[in-house]
Image (cartoon, helix red, strand yellow):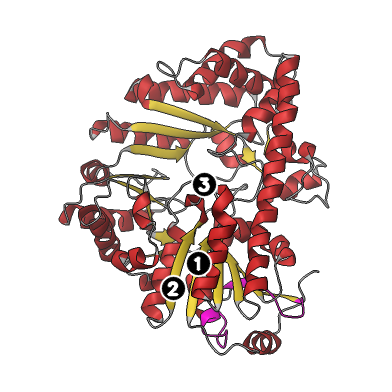
Amino acid sequence: MLPKPFTVGRLIRNMLADNPGTKSILYVRLPCWKIYPGGVIYVADYIHKQRPNIAQHLLDLALVAPGQRKRVLRNKLQELQPDLVAFSWRNMQSFGPHPEDDALDVVMKFDHSPHLWDRLKSVKDAVRIIGDYVLSRLRNFGYMKMVRRLLPEARIVVGGTAVSIFGKHVVTKCPNDTVVVIGEGEDAMLSIVDGLTNPKGEYFYKDKSGTVTHRIRSEDFDLRQLTAVDFPYVESIFPSFREYLGDDIGVHTKRGCPFQCHFCLYNKIEGAQQRYRDPAEIGKEIEVLNQRYGVKHIWFTDAQFCSTRRSMEHVEHVLDEMLARQTRVSWSGYLRLNYLTPSIAQKMLATGMCSVDLSFTGSQEVIDHLTLGYSLEQQMEAFRMLKAQGHDKQKVKLYIPLNAPGETMETLRRTIDKIKEIYGLFGRDQVLPFIFFIGIQPGTPVEKLLIERGYLPPNYNPLTLNPFTIKKLLYNPKPLGKLIGRAYLEAVESLDPSSEYIGRLTLDIIERNLPTFAPELVASPALNS
């Protein structure tokens, strides 16, 4: 059922019906690989500070054995009898490679392996991955149906990365009286807790009759309200909290992205205007994690830890706070380095930056085709600046969108040349080229263009189970797809992990094979050609 146009009066009447107010919340982190549940922790901490009388509990199904999850959830629902159950859903697309499966390897083998057995095995692996994907979705919706069955009056909320992208598809499968939150959840969750007398945020609501309505965000959440997380409180509602302390702990410093990258949804999910947390609160948060809980590794979870000139100023204030508090952590996060200064580079090193993580292509043409919004030469100058300031032990992780729209043999050669230049700066062993292909996301400019060009059908389902469509959503088309795919597979077969990294070896093989690649097959169509 498609959402009906939003009417404030009707939505408020629907959501206030039989809703005397929220007294208790159970957060359920739906199964995924083990990764710190930072998003739901920020929401729970914020709700506690705004409504301290509400009882909260966080159940992380990622830490529960698969065969025990249904029983554990049922027991927790019966024990706590919450009147609001909030699910956090991280992963939904089957093509997104992650530690539990590798769709990329399967697609590469099916499309490009010269060995019949590998291609046949890839079909079997694809069936397994899609089967796991289907069962995972069914189980997740089954957990929601369990809530509705055991607690017929409880309201259900669903949020997280997956539903921020696919919310309109998710809401139709949810039980009645479910709110599906899109994007940041603190203000939306608070308004739901309060009965939505003052609606905030973006969400879909499926009311008790099954009618779906949609509210579009009309306000920005003030990130200055996100004070340092009260970790002792979090530990009291999340008994499994300490199981994550040896891993990277996510810390948020800002939201919003002013860039218009053709394949990215951050500027739609978080908004185009960057908003910042108070650096003192960020410093306090890191200090408590480090000194009270012994956390050694921080991952800044922003779309990009630093990007614009103003965000660089904010980063410097955050680093100053870390220096003043003498935190002893290593940290990393996605970066843009175009506004890097020697002073900030020194402070990055002094505060424990352990790697340089950034998107990279060695061709200004591809940068412009993808509207990435930066200068390649500025980026290379920033690498030289980092080296000059003493960054010689940190890994340099380059996330390379190979065969993106606009890629040609010449741009591929230039990318390899630039990476070799980076090898020369930092040492080959310190540079980790991570090869990925653009994933086509719904609502992005690249999706629109590829539909216009007939690459995707206009009515395709982004959550399709059709393996041939799923394969297309990992964008690696002819003619360069074959060159890259076979180089990757050769690297996998010949790799000695103790002495080489697969991204470096793949680029070496591509460089070796480029001179014999058919010269008339030159380009993947440009986005704006």
Q: Is residue 25 left or right of residue 5?
A: left
* Image: 68 above or below 175: above
Question: What SS does tag 1 mark?
Answer: strand
Residue 57 visible from this viewpoint: yes
Crowd class of label 1 (few under 14; some 14 to 19; many from 20; radius 10 Å): many
Crowd class of label 2 (few under 14; some 14 to 19; many from 20; radius 10 Å): many
Q: Quadrant of residue 385?
A: top left
Say which amino acid is labelled 3: Gly
Q: Nearer the viewer, residue 400 or 92?
A: 92
Instruction: Give residue 75's position: percent from left, percent from top.
Output: 53, 65
Q: Earlier in the sequence, mark 1 or mark 3?
A: 1
What residue is shown with label 3? 373
Asked whether residue 17 is drawn in magenta, I would say: no
Range of magenta residues: 191-211
What residue is shown with label 1? 27
What residue is shown with label 2? 56
Q: Nearer the viewer, residue 216 or 327?
A: 327
Q: Nearer the viewer, residue 511 or 239?
A: 239
Q: Are marks 1 and 3 in contact (CB under 8 Å)?
A: no
Name the magenta segment's main secondary structure. loop
Total numbered labels placed on residues in the image: 3
Q: Which mark is residue 298?
A: none
Q: Quadrant of residue 88?
A: bottom right
